[in-house]
Protein backbone atom coordinates (compact mmCIF):
# COMPACT_ATOMS: atom_id res chain seq x y z
CA UNK A 1 0.00 0.00 0.00
CA UNK A 2 1.28 3.46 -0.92
CA UNK A 3 -1.23 5.42 1.04
CA UNK A 4 -2.94 5.24 4.43
CA UNK A 5 -5.70 7.84 4.33
CA UNK A 6 -9.32 7.10 5.17
CA UNK A 7 -12.39 8.79 3.71
CA UNK A 8 -15.85 8.83 5.27
CA UNK A 9 -18.90 10.00 3.31
CA UNK A 10 -21.01 12.02 5.76
CA UNK A 11 -24.80 12.39 5.64
CA UNK A 12 -24.41 15.95 4.28
CA UNK A 13 -22.62 14.53 1.22
CA UNK A 14 -19.19 15.84 2.24
CA UNK A 15 -16.16 13.63 2.85
CA UNK A 16 -14.07 13.61 6.03
CA UNK A 17 -10.43 12.55 5.61
CA UNK A 18 -7.76 11.40 8.05
CA UNK A 19 -4.99 8.84 8.40
CA UNK A 20 -5.47 5.27 9.54
CA UNK A 21 -4.75 3.69 12.90
CA UNK A 22 -2.06 1.66 11.11
CA UNK A 23 -0.42 4.83 9.70
CA UNK A 24 -0.36 6.68 13.01
CA UNK A 25 1.09 3.57 14.63
CA UNK A 26 3.88 3.38 12.01
CA UNK A 27 4.64 7.08 12.39
CA UNK A 28 4.79 7.04 16.19
CA UNK A 29 4.17 10.16 18.26
CA UNK A 30 2.83 12.89 15.99
CA UNK A 31 4.31 16.31 16.73
CA UNK A 32 3.05 18.51 13.88
CA UNK A 33 0.31 18.54 11.24
CA UNK A 34 0.34 20.98 8.32
CA UNK A 35 -3.16 21.47 6.90
CA UNK A 36 -4.29 23.10 3.62
CA UNK A 37 -6.15 26.37 3.13
CA UNK A 38 -9.95 26.30 3.29
CA UNK A 39 -11.44 26.81 -0.19
CA UNK A 40 -8.53 25.11 -1.96
CA UNK A 41 -9.57 22.99 -4.96
CA UNK A 42 -7.79 19.63 -5.04
CA UNK A 43 -7.67 16.51 -7.22
CA UNK A 44 -7.88 12.91 -6.10
CA UNK A 45 -4.40 11.73 -5.10
CA UNK A 46 -3.03 15.25 -4.59
CA UNK A 47 -1.03 16.10 -1.46
CA UNK A 48 -3.26 17.95 1.02
CA UNK A 49 -1.38 17.80 4.31
CA UNK A 50 1.87 16.83 5.95
CA UNK A 51 2.12 14.94 9.21
CA UNK A 52 5.37 14.94 11.17
CA UNK A 53 6.25 12.51 13.91
CA UNK A 54 9.30 11.88 16.04
CA UNK A 55 10.34 9.31 13.40
CA UNK A 56 9.42 10.84 10.01
CA UNK A 57 7.45 13.33 7.95
CA UNK A 58 4.77 11.94 5.70
CA UNK A 59 2.52 13.44 3.04
CA UNK A 60 -1.25 12.98 3.22
CA UNK A 61 -3.03 12.56 -0.13
CA UNK A 62 -6.66 13.33 -0.82
CA UNK A 63 -8.76 10.21 -1.47
CA UNK A 64 -11.22 12.34 -3.49
CA UNK A 65 -11.13 15.51 -5.53
CA UNK A 66 -13.12 18.58 -4.58
CA UNK A 67 -12.92 21.69 -2.43
CA UNK A 68 -11.57 21.95 1.13
CA UNK A 69 -14.50 23.02 3.32
CA UNK A 70 -13.00 22.66 6.76
CA UNK A 71 -9.73 21.78 8.47
CA UNK A 72 -9.32 20.38 11.98
CA UNK A 73 -7.76 23.34 13.77
CA UNK A 74 -7.44 21.31 16.98
CA UNK A 75 -4.48 19.54 15.36
CA UNK A 76 -2.49 22.77 15.34
CA UNK A 77 -2.13 22.80 19.14
CA UNK A 78 -2.75 19.11 19.80
CA UNK A 79 -1.36 16.98 16.92
CA UNK A 80 -1.24 13.96 19.27
CA UNK A 81 -5.04 13.63 18.85
CA UNK A 82 -4.19 11.84 15.58
CA UNK A 83 -2.49 9.12 17.66
CA UNK A 84 -5.25 8.78 20.25
CA UNK A 85 -8.29 9.11 17.97
CA UNK A 86 -7.38 8.77 14.27
CA UNK A 87 -10.96 8.11 13.10
CA UNK A 88 -12.93 10.48 15.31
CA UNK A 89 -11.26 13.54 16.92
CA UNK A 90 -8.11 13.28 14.80
CA UNK A 91 -9.61 13.87 11.33
CA UNK A 92 -7.67 16.27 9.05
CA UNK A 93 -9.99 17.85 6.48
CA UNK A 94 -13.56 17.91 5.17
CA UNK A 95 -14.03 18.04 1.41
CA UNK A 96 -16.99 18.87 -0.80
CA UNK A 97 -16.37 16.15 -3.42
CA UNK A 98 -16.53 17.11 -7.09
CA UNK A 99 -17.19 13.50 -8.14
CA UNK A 100 -18.60 11.06 -5.58
CA UNK A 101 -17.91 8.11 -7.90
CA UNK A 102 -14.21 8.52 -6.95
CA UNK A 103 -15.14 6.99 -3.58
CA UNK A 104 -15.89 3.72 -5.37
CA UNK A 105 -12.21 3.34 -6.31
CA UNK A 106 -11.14 3.29 -2.65
CA UNK A 107 -10.54 0.16 -0.56
CA UNK A 108 -13.12 -0.87 2.01
CA UNK A 109 -11.87 -0.98 5.63
CA UNK A 110 -11.72 -4.79 5.34
CA UNK A 111 -9.67 -4.69 2.11
CA UNK A 112 -7.34 -2.12 3.67
CA UNK A 113 -6.79 -4.26 6.79
CA UNK A 114 -5.98 -7.29 4.64
CA UNK A 115 -3.42 -5.26 2.67
CA UNK A 116 -1.78 -4.00 5.86
CA UNK A 117 -1.29 -7.57 7.12
CA UNK A 118 0.67 -8.65 4.01
Image: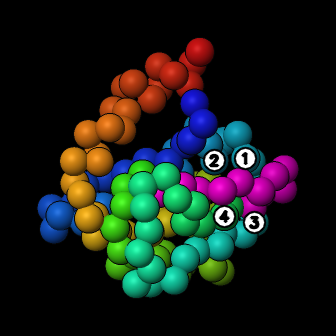
The answer to if 54 sits in the magenta stretch is: yes
The answer to whether residue 66 shows anywhere in this view is yes
Whole-percent x, y for residue 78 in the image: 64, 74
Q: Indicate the quadrant containing the C terminus: top left, top right, bottom left or bottom right.
A: top right
Q: Is residue 69 above or below residue 17?
A: below
Q: Between residue 116 and residue 31, name the one nearer to us.
A: 116
Circle 2 sits on which residue? 24
Label 3 crowd bin: few (<14), some (14–19), many (20+), radius 10 Å: many
Q: Earlier in the sequence, mark 2 or mark 4?
A: 2
Residue behind mark 1: 27
Q: Which residue is found at the position 57% from the left and 30% from the top?
A: 1
Query: Which secondary structure is most common in the magenta stretch?
Result: strand
Where is 118 relative to 48, above or below?
A: above
Q: Could you say whether the residue bearing mark 2 is in a helix, strand or loop?
A: helix
Q: Is residue 57 magenta?
A: yes
Q: Which residue is mark 4?
A: 50
Q: Is residue 33 left or right of residue 64?
A: right
Of marks 1 and 4, the one in the foreground? 4
Is 83 placed left or right of 103 in the picture? right
As drawn, the label of residue 31 is 3
**CB contact under 8 Å: marks 2 and 4:** no
Indicate the position of residue 82 as horizontal and vertical percent values: 58, 59
Distance, label 2 to label 4, CA atoms, is: 13 Å
Disc 1 + disc 2, Cβ < 8 Å: yes
Secondary structure beneath dot 3 equals: strand
Q: How far apart are the two marked residues, 3 and 4, measured between alpha carbons? A: 11 Å
Instruction: Looking at the image, tell me whether mark 3 or mark 4 is earlier in sequence order.
Output: 3
Dot 4 falls on a residue whose secondary structure is strand
Amino acid sequence: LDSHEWARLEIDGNVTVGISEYAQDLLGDIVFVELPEIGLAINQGEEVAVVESVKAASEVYSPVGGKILEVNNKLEDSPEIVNSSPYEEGWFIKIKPSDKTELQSLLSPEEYSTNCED
